[in-house]
Amino acid sequence: MVMKKELPLISVIVPIYNSEKYLRKCIESIINQTYNHLEIILVNDGSKDASLLICKEFEKKDNRIIIIDLPNRGVSNARNQGTSIANGVYIQYIDSDDFVDNIYIETLFSTLQNKNVELAVCAIESFDIKGNKFDEWKVKENRLDFNNINKTLFLELIQKFLLFGPVNKLYKKEIITNNSIVFDTSLSYGEDLLFNLEYCKHIDSLAITDKIAYKYIHDNTESLSKKRYANKIALAKRIHYALLTLFKRLELTDNESMSILYYRLFDYYYNEVFVIINDNKLTFIKKHKEIKVLLREKELGRSYAFLKTEKYTAWIVFLMKNKCAFSFLSLDSILKKINN
């Protein structure tokens, strides 16, 4: 008699903070997976709503569930704590306000096994809070070898943000632990991309499936591009240089590749200028000073060489290139008066 080989244990880590609105659907989508050899680690990050009680309800019903109850220290710490106790051969992160198809884990595991890679990535669908689909990110099923890079595929993954977050992926735990890869708890933005870039340093290949199995719920009324927080541009530059290091490692320094990289960087500056302009807490003089400093940054200056201005409002790009902070604010004030 041939013994059926037992499937490896997969640890699913769910950071949770005030997620009672979506949490039940999220957990149910995990416990109903076709791949059932799971360890489900629910990390409550100091929730003030009923999230912890919901976790305990499910814990009574499913012995695969482990609860970690922490004081609120942020999503990065929650993910790190979950990873530190995980017993699985593979690690997976799912956000508590999202949900997944019942074939989600099986799809990623099969992709990783069949393609013989160290990271599996699936497509993502995005929904609004009413359940209406409004976007999707996917590429054709393929394998990406870092030692023999497919430029077209790599750039498509970058442009469609499929390498950026920790969700929609299956990682090998030994690569994370052996290389001490963690989510940086000091960062409020970009820590997930930096985690992935660090992981990619230590692997030879990844595989993508075009099956859309991860469902992202867009319930953010104030997007990051419109939000002010400390050191945003410093973080944007850190992410830029981390990506630049990867591009250089892959020998993708041609104009097309650099254009994609520097477009992303320019977008940060472009959005930040308007965040400053629309910040009602700042005086005109303070706005002028902050924009002036921003427009003088060397990284922004480098981005102009790769810019196709038709994507942006021409007069805005002209004023940015010429560092016209005062004119920027004056014209914006005039346009607002005309529109009102």
Image (spheres, rainbow, N blue to C red):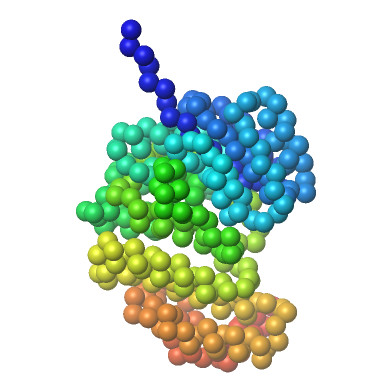
Residue pictured at 47% horizontal, 84% vertical: 297
Give how far across and how far down residue 306 sits, in percent. Answer: 34, 75
Q: Nearer the viewer, residue 88 or 263?
A: 88
Q: Nearer the viewer, residue 121 or 124?
A: 121
Counting the numbered discs, the total is: 0
Residue pictured at 77% horizontal, 41% vertical: 50
Residue pictured at 67% horizontal, 77% vertical: 279
Q: Quadrant of residue 52?
A: top right
Q: From this viewpoint, is residue 155 visible?
A: yes
Give how far across and how far down residue 264 sits, in percent. Answer: 43, 68
Q: Nearer the viewer, residue 54 or 88?
A: 88
The quarter of the picture where the C terminus appears is bottom right
Along the horizontal axis of the image, is 266 left or right of 257? Answer: right
Give how far across and how far down residue 239 sits, in percent. Answer: 45, 67
Q: Quadrant of residue 329?
A: bottom right
Q: Nearer the viewer, residue 323 or 173?
A: 173
* Residue furthest left in the image: 148
Determine whether 17 is above or below 194 in the image. Answer: above
Give how far across and how far down residue 312 sits, in percent. Answer: 45, 74
Determine whether 87 is above or below 228 in the image. Answer: above
The quarter of the picture where the N terminus appears is top left
* Residue furthest top in the image: 1
Along the horizontal axis of the image, is 5 left or right of 69? Answer: left
Determine whether 66 is above or below 196 in the image. Answer: above
Along the horizontal axis of the image, is 31 left or right of 22? Answer: left
Q: From this viewpoint, is residue 140 visible?
A: no
